Image (cartoon, rainbow, N blue to C red):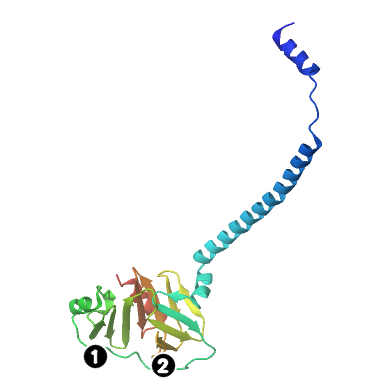
Amino acid sequence: MNLDDELRAVGRSAAVPPPPDDLTAAVLTRVAGVKPRKRLRDRWRAFLAGFLVLLAGAVLTPPVRATVAEWLRIGGVQAQPVGTGPSTAPPPPSVTTHLSLADAARVAGFTPQLPKTLGTPTGVEASPGFVATSWVGVRLEQFRSGIEPMYIKQYYNELEYVPEINAFWFSTPHELVLVDKRVVRIAGPTLVWERAGVTFRLEGVDRARAIQLAKGTP
């Protein structure tokens, strides 16, 4: 008989005593306790995965982004829907101060960016973190977004997301409010977008023209 046959014979002849009852009960209890927790972990992981998929969709889908922006911020602008709003708005106010762009940059602390096709503005004013420029019938404000919003737009119509420039179009007149709750004025249709930590508000042109000007702003 070779070694393999001898080992098999020893194995067949060996008597292995059954495990004690308390050990069997302990093992069964352990198994019974682990499986529900494992199932719970699996369900939690499945829920978390599904939530992350929904969150990614909210980030990537423009209509959902527009819905979120109705109660969140767009750069330095807080958008708040209201039940009713103004039906008309006056033309945007012209900027009457005539700073140079270099002086405006020094006061604001950042270099203002202007639409290339509008040419030299008729007025430029600035304060720390803020620059306003105007042309005939057109007003562009730009300001650092910051931690707190600068403006609250109380609108009563839906926001329209403009995916090509990652902007939002306020299609109807709305109240423009400072963060201290003072109503500044009634604003007309406005395009709002953010770029490199600066929020832009462009007012006084229609939607198509506003998008064109925003694309031409460095």
- Classify 143 as above or below 123: above
Q: Residue furthest top?
A: 1
Query: Which residue is located at x 81 percent, y 37 percent?
Result: 21
Q: Nearer the viewer, mark 2 or mark 1?
A: 1
Pick the quarter of the image with the C terminus.
bottom left
> Nearer the N terminus, badge 2 or badge 1?
2
Q: Nearer the viewer, residue 158 or 105?
A: 105
In the picture, the disc for residue 89 is 2
- Classify 38 as above or below 202: above
- Secondary structure of the residue carrying numbered label 2: loop
Q: Nearer the viewer, residue 130 or 85?
A: 130
Q: Is residue 100 left or right of residue 12?
A: left
Q: Is residue 200 left or right of residue 46?
A: left
- Classify 3 as above or below 126: above
- Secondary structure of the residue carrying numbered label 1: loop
Q: Position of residue 209 (x, y in %)?
A: 37, 79
Q: Position of residue 114 (x, y in %)?
A: 27, 76
Tell me where residue 54 sits by quadrant: bottom right
Marks 2 & 1, CB-CB < 8 Å contact: no
Mark 1 neighbour density, 10 Å: few (under 14) some (14–19) many (20 or more): few
- For the residue marked with disc 1, what is the amino acid? Thr
Q: Which residue is mark 1?
A: 96
In the picture, the disc for residue 2 is none
Q: Nearer the viewer, residue 7 or 22?
A: 22
Q: Is residue 14 left or right of residue 212?
A: right
Pick the quarter of the image with the N terminus.
top right
Q: Position of residue 68 (x, y in %)?
A: 51, 73
